[in-house]
Image (cartoon, rainbow, N blue to C red):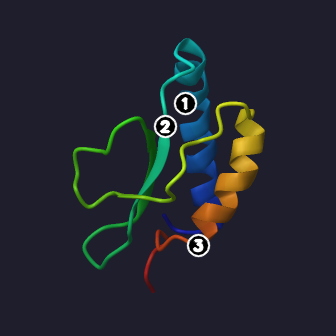
C-alpha cells in the first residue's frame, strides 16, 4: 500500500465485505491479517475467519473484530491498528 489513504480505503472495503458475513453467522470470529511490506512485495490487509493461504500474512492483533460494533466503529479501531503495521511502501 502506498500511503495511509490506500490503507483506509482497503480497510473500509474489507469491513464492508465482513459485515454481511458476520450478520449471517454471529458466532464466527473474524480477524485482521496483514502482509508486511518488503522489497519483494507491497503490504496488504485482509479480514478472514481463518489464516490466509499465504503463510506470510500475520494476525494484526489477538482479538477478533468486535461483533457488536458497526463497520464504522470497527473502522475507527482498526485504522489505529493499521497505522502501526509495516504495510506502507518502503522508500
- Of the two numbered discs 2 and 1 on the same chain, state the one appearing first in sequence: 1
Closest to the observer, 30 or 16: 30
Q: Residue furthest bottom?
A: 91
Image-quadrant location for residue 89 = bottom left
44 in relation to 69, above or below: below
Q: Which residue shows up at 54% across the image and 39% down it?
A: 14
The residue that label 3 is drawn on is 84
Q: Secondary structure at mark 2?
A: loop
- Of the two numbered discs 3 and 1 on the same chain, state the one appearing first in sequence: 1
51 in relation to 36, above or below: above
22 in relation to 37, above or below: above
Residue 30: numbered disc? 2
Q: Position of residue 80 (x, y in %)?
A: 68, 63
Check if mark 2's residue and mark 1's residue have beta carbons within 8 Å.
yes
Q: Which residue shows up at 75% across the image and 32% down it?
A: 70
The residue that label 1 is drawn on is 18
Amino acid at each position: 500500500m502506498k500511503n495511509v489513504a490506500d490503507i483506509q480505503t482497503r480497510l473500509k472495503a474489507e469491513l464492508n465485505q465482513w459485515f454481511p458475513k458476520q450478520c449471517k453467522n454471529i458466532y464466527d470470529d473474524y480477524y485482521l491479517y496483514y502482509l508486511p511490506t518488503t522489497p519483494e512485495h507491497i503490504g496488504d490487509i485482509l479480514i478472514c475467519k481463518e489464516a490466509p493461504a499465504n503463510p506470510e500474512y500475520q494476525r494484526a492483533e489477538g482479538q477478533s473484530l468486535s461483533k457488536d460494533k458497526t463497520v464504522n466503529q470497527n473502522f475507527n479501531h482498526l485504522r489505529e491498528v493499521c497505522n502501526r503495521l509495516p504495510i506502507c511502501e518502503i522508500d
